[in-house]
């Protein structure tokens, strides 16, 4: 049952109505709902607050523009800041000993401990998140909870560091930087599919250019790969089939796609080298047949070549994830970070997925992109989402993630509407290239035994739905689940999601394919309706609903509308801050990073309208809230759309903001500046 609002007096700030003034007829709750306006009880309504725009010194209402600095100036300022006493060397701060830094006087950071302590901000209230876990704080003297550290604790009894998984090791990063990381599975599959390998690394390119380079044999002998004739296909009757037209030599293969066309779809045959290897024609043909079918080629003949290609298991032989009726937290840009996912796990989420990571950035070893793959031990069913425009790029990334990360599934984003992603040919732009989708899924699914899932929108252009043409074949291409967001790319987030079309797509899906619906799930009644209306919908992915009220997972599991109080919401914010300090650090930089992501999240939670303030429940995601008071001062701050109020809430949890602090939500950026964006 829905909780009712407590009997409270109307706020004193409500304007008094004189006897002479006519009282305008207020629309009924049904009329407000029809206009997509939240039906807040009249006792809590208030006039919209008046906010003055910042003015220049000379007058006028124009916003002051910040002068853009050159890269050289920014670099010089950064080096000066590093040498300042506010940036203490990490090793010195951790140990408290000036001699602990191996760089000595050549270190870029300050070693003056007394000067650092004299200007260090006051400690925050509370306890160090690391010492509370029985660990040695890795930030030492730079921790903003230094006074709570226990100096008498033996470090060996309290290990240092967090328990997060999927870190980027320096060894792997250097290999990626130098383009020396090997991708044997992806390279072989791309070659067999007849696709151009545009991301071939330098070492492989050098081997291809050198005809003397050989592959590993069973013994010490070397045999050139070019000696194996691969221009012949077997016929069931035992006859040879000429493949001079360059057909792909793989089952269920696809033709090359236009962005990465193969100049020569067939492999050149060097007959002179073939005779010099000692491999008979019939033996060579049989080995090629095995190679084409993805079988590991091996022979006892010392002159034959051992090629370790991937075995291609059937989808039913792969590890299966049953998504049915599991609460799935969508991959969310910026706010879907590890602390937020960890918070949602405590509130009832079953499946979590990391933020979208660009394939090119991962292959280049960018630490900031690899941070999106981090996994907390509490995420027992965890996947990562990657995004790329080409089959070779995606296949290499899948192989890289499969080798170096602990994940349960890998999701390929084919629905991102952001301009910078679409303009590169990735995200929702793939919906205009179905053959490219086929190539990507086929190439990626064969290089990993983990389940591969795909996330799409209904279409690129409004009114030209394409998802139904994909869902019937994508299982045969290699995907085990597909998530359909019920909006087009052009629509962005305007209008409600088209769940009727999602149901149509689910009806066309094969029995073994999990279909996950996505869009406008904001209450347990929404979740129940979508799951029950179509039996082929495995579950619903929860995105913006979780951003605005992450306790939605609790509501679904307990089947109730939770009239959450401001104190309970504050406790949830405290948990997020604690998780953030453990993830980003308890030093000044970590505190401000936690504050930044807290404010980004508060810019969404302010859209939540408490159950006790509504005439009609549950709240819908497309309702526009009027200006209203909360039931107490804290709740009034939480429902405010002013960044100043969000900043005050952050100061309750993380202390005063630094001097000159400003904040603008990322989602308030210029996202609708072009006509095609809606």
Image (cartoon, helix red, strand yellow):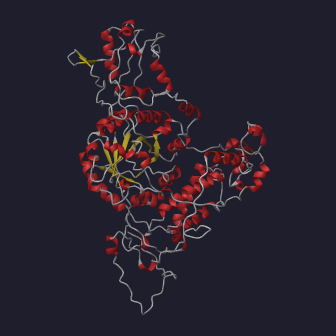
**Foreground pick, 381 / 399:** 399
**Foreground pick, 405 / 160:** 405
Seen in the image, is 170 located left or right of residue 667? Answer: right
Residue at x 26%, y 48% (from the top left corner): 505
Q: Is residue 534 visible?
A: no
Seen in the image, is 292 located left or right of residue 335? Answer: left
Q: Is residue 463 visible?
A: yes
Quarter-of-image position of residue 662:
bottom right
Seen in the image, is 469 located left or right of residue 541? Answer: left
Q: Quadrant of the C terminus?
A: bottom left
Q: Is residue 616 above or below residue 446?
A: below
Q: Position of residue 454 (x, y in %)?
A: 36, 43
Quarter-of-image position of residue 524:
bottom left
Residue at x 74%, y 45% (from the top left corner): 110
Q: Position of residue 171 (x, y in %)?
A: 58, 31
Q: Residue furthest left?
A: 237
Seen in the image, is 12 located left or right of residue 542? Answer: right
Q: Is residue 11 above or below residue 261?
A: below
**Foreground pick, 493 / 171:** 493
Residue at x 50%, y 24% (from the top left corner): 203
Q: Is residue 26 above or below residue 82?
A: below
**Foreground pick, 571 / 373:** 373
Q: Quadrant of the N terminus?
A: bottom left
């Amino acid at each position: 049952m829905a909780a009712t609002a407590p009997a409270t007096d109307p706020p004193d700030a409500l304007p008094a109505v004189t006897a002479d003034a006519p009282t305008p007829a207020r629309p009924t709750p049904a009329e407000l709902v029809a206009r997509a306006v939240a039906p807040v009880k009249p006792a809590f309504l208030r006039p919209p607050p008046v906010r003055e725009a910042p003015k220049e010194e000379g007058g006028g209402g124009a916003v002051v523009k910040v002068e853009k600095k050159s890269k050289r100036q920014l670099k010089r300022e950064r080096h000066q800041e590093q040498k300042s006493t506010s940036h203490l060397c990490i090793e010195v701060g951790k140990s408290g000993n000036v001699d602990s830094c191996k760089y000595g006087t050549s270190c870029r950071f300050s070693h003056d401990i007394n000067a650092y302590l004299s200007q260090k901000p006051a400690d925050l209230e509370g306890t160090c998140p690391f010492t509370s876990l029985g660990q040695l704080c890795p930030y030492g003297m730079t921790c903003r909870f230094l006074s709570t550290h226990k100096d008498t604790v033996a470090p060996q009894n309290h290990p240092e560091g967090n328990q997060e998984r999927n870190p980027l090791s320096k060894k792997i990063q250097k290999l990626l930087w130098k383009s020396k990381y090997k991708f044997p599975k992806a390279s072989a599959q791309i070659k067999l599919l007849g696709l151009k390998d545009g991301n071939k690394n330098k070492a492989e390119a050098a081997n291809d250019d050198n005809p003397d380079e050989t592959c590993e044999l069973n013994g010490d002998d070397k045999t050139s790969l070019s000696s194996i004739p691969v221009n012949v296909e077997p016929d069931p009757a035992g006859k040879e089939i000429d493949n001079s037209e360059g057909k792909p030599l793989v089952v269920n293969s696809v033709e090359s796609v236009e962005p990465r066309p193969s100049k020569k779809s067939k492999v050149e045959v060097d007959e002179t080298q073939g005779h010099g290897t000692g491999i008979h024609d019939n033996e060579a043909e049989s080995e090629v047949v095995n190679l084409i079918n993805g079988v590991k080629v091996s022979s006892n003949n010392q002159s034959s070549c051992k090629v370790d290609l991937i075995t291609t298991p059937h989808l039913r032989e792969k590890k299966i994830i049953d998504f049915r009726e599991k609460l799935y937290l969508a991959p969310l840009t910026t706010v879907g970070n590890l602390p937020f996912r960890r918070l949602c796990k405590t509130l009832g989420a079953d499946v979590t997925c990391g933020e979208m990571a660009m394939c090119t950035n991962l292959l280049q070893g960018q630490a900031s992109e690899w941070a999106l793959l981090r996994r907390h031990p509490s995420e027992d069913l965890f996947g990562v989402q990657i995004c790329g425009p080409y089959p070779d790029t995606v296949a290499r990334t899948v192989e890289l993630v499969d080798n170096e990360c602990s994940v349960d599934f890998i999701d390929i984003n084919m629905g991102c509407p952001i301009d910078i992603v679409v303009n590169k040919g990735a995200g929702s732009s793939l919906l205009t290239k179905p053959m490219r989708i086929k190539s990507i899924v086929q190439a990626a699914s064969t290089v990993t035994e983990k389940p591969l899932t795909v996330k799409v929108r209904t279409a690129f252009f409004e009114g030209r739905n394409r998802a139904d043409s994909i869902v019937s074949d994508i299982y045969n291409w290699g995907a085990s689940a597909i998530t359909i967001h019920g909006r087009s790319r052009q629509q962005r987030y305007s209008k409600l999601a088209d769940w009727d079309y999602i149901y149509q797509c689910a009806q066309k899906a094969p029995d073994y394919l999990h279909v996950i619906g996505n869009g406008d799930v904001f209450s347990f009644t929404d979740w129940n309706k979508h799951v029950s209306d179509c039996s082929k919908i495995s579950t619903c992915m929860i995105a913006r609903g979780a951003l605005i009220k992450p306790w939605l997972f609790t509501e679904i599991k307990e089947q109730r509308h939770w009239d959450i109080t401001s104190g309970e919401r504050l406790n949830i914010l405290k948990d997020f801050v604690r998780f953030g300090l453990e993830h980003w650090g308890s030093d000044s930089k970590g505190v401000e990073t936690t504050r930044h992501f807290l404010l980004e999240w508060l810019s969404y939670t302010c859209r939540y309208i408490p159950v006790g303030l509504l005439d009609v429940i549950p709240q819908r995601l497309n309702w526009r809230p009027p200006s209203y008071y909360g039931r107490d001062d804290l709740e009034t701050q939480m429902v405010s759309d002013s960044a100043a109020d969000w900043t005050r809430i952050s100061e309750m949890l993380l202390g005063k903001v630094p001097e000159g602090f400003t904040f603008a939500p990322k989602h308030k950026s210029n996202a609708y500046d072009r006509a095609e964006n809606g």
